[in-house]
Amino acid sequence: MEVTNFGTVPSKPSTVNVLKGRELLSKRTVRGLKPFEKSMVRLPVKKALPKGSKGEFTVLIESEGLPVEKHTQSVQLPIN
């Protein structure tokens, strides 16, 4: 996953959480970023998901002193 600081000041470290429903699948910390800097974050899941399954996944980005960012999307996983 690519994380970008679209602000004009450096960001503080943030936590990225990936959930399926209420189940936490992955959690990683992202280092602080300079303005407009990008970082690739690898988010390995804790358990395998069934091939071809469909579900609603949520990404939560938590940064100290800021509201939690929430992004939700329905995804169909590949069959192979």
Image (cartoon, helix red, strand yellow):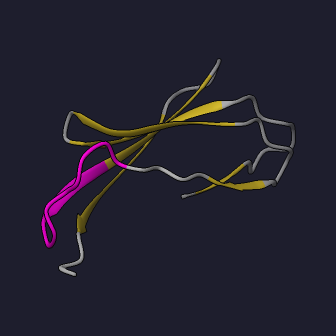
User: Which residue is painted at 25% across and 66% down in the image?
Assistant: 75
Left or right: 79 as drawn, with respect to 8: left
Which residue range is magenta in the image?
45-57
Query: Residue 2 lies in what quarter of the image?
Result: bottom right
Residue 73 location, x and y as percent?
A: 31, 58
The quarter of the image holding the N terminus is bottom right
Left or right: 12 as drawn, with respect to 65: right
Q: Main secondary structure of the magenta part?
A: loop
Q: Considering only vertical position in the picture, is 15 above or below 33?
A: above
Residue 74 location, x and y as percent?
A: 24, 62
User: Which residue is painted at 24% across and 46% down in the image?
Assistant: 47
User: Which residue is painted at 81% across and 54% down in the image?
Assistant: 36
Q: Residue furthest top?
A: 65
The answer to which of 25 and 35 lies nearer the viewer is: 25
Query: Residue 56 lies in what quarter of the image?
Result: bottom left
The answer to which of 80 and 3 lies nearer the viewer is: 80
Left or right: 80 as drawn, with respect to 44: left
Left or right: 62 as drawn, with respect to 52: right
Q: Residue furthest bottom?
A: 80
User: Which residue is painted at 19% across and 57% down in the image?
Assistant: 49
Residue 45 location, x and y as percent?
A: 34, 48
